[in-house]
Image (cartoon, rainbow, N blue to C red):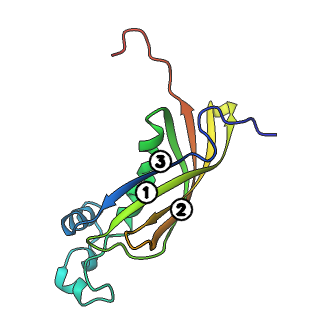
Amino acid sequence: MNTPPRVVTVGETFSATLSLVAESIKSFATLVNDLNPLHHDDAYAAQSRFGGLIASGTQPTAHFMALLATHFSTYAQPLGLEFDIKLKKAAHSGDTLTMTWRVVGAFWKASLNGDLTQLEGSVVNQRSETVVIGKSTILVMPKPAAQEGDA
């Protein structure tokens, strides 16, 4: 039998938004060396099936994955272990994406000094279309007590 979690709460849900503008799409794609013209060339993208610039798949997924660390690091020490990400729809320039994760399971793992935590999440655009879905397993450890003299 698994030991109940000590750090996270099953059912805990958290969200963040990401606004995609043309300049951020182009700069992010350049940063990750994704040279697909759908992310850089307005004229090319306008003639595509998408009708305009779309974000590299790495852009919404990177923000989606980073949300786990951003959220849990406010009160614990998170460590990503596993991600299963599916891209469902293109993210377009001008979209506002809402990224949401929910803790669906967790148990204390003494040998790792933390909760092994399973999450499910999604990224939805302003038209309520699902752009990304994902599952993750992370380790969430308690923050160490502050040492005397630490600022």
Instruction: Give the residue type that dot 2 points to.
Output: Gly
Q: Work out which residue is located at the far right of the displayed protein and give it.
A: 1
Seen in the picture, residue 117 relative to 131 is either above or below; the reply is above
What's the CA distance linking mark 3 and mark 2?
12 Å
Residue 47 in percent (x, y) is at 24, 90
Which structural element holds mark 1?
helix
Residue 146 in percent (x, y) is at 44, 17
The image quadrant of residue 60 is bottom left
What's the CA distance linking mark 1 and mark 3?
8 Å
Quadrant (top left/top right/bottom left/bottom right) for the C terminus: top left
> In this orientation, which residue lies closer to the viewer: 18 or 107?
18
Mark 3 highlights which residue? 68
Residue 35 in percent (x, y) is at 26, 73
Disc 2: CA contacts within 10 A as few (<14), some (14-19) or many (>=20):
some
The image quadrant of residue 2 is top right
Mark 1 highlights which residue? 64
Left or right: 139 in relation to 17:
right
Nearest to N terminus: mark 3 or mark 2: 3
Mark 2 highlights which residue? 134
What's the CA distance linking mark 1 and mark 2?
9 Å
Left or right: 136 in relation to 37:
right
Q: CB under 8 Å between callouts 1 and 2?
A: yes
Seen in the picture, residue 74 relative to 55 is either above or below; the reply is above
Instruction: Give the residue type that dot 3 points to.
Output: Leu
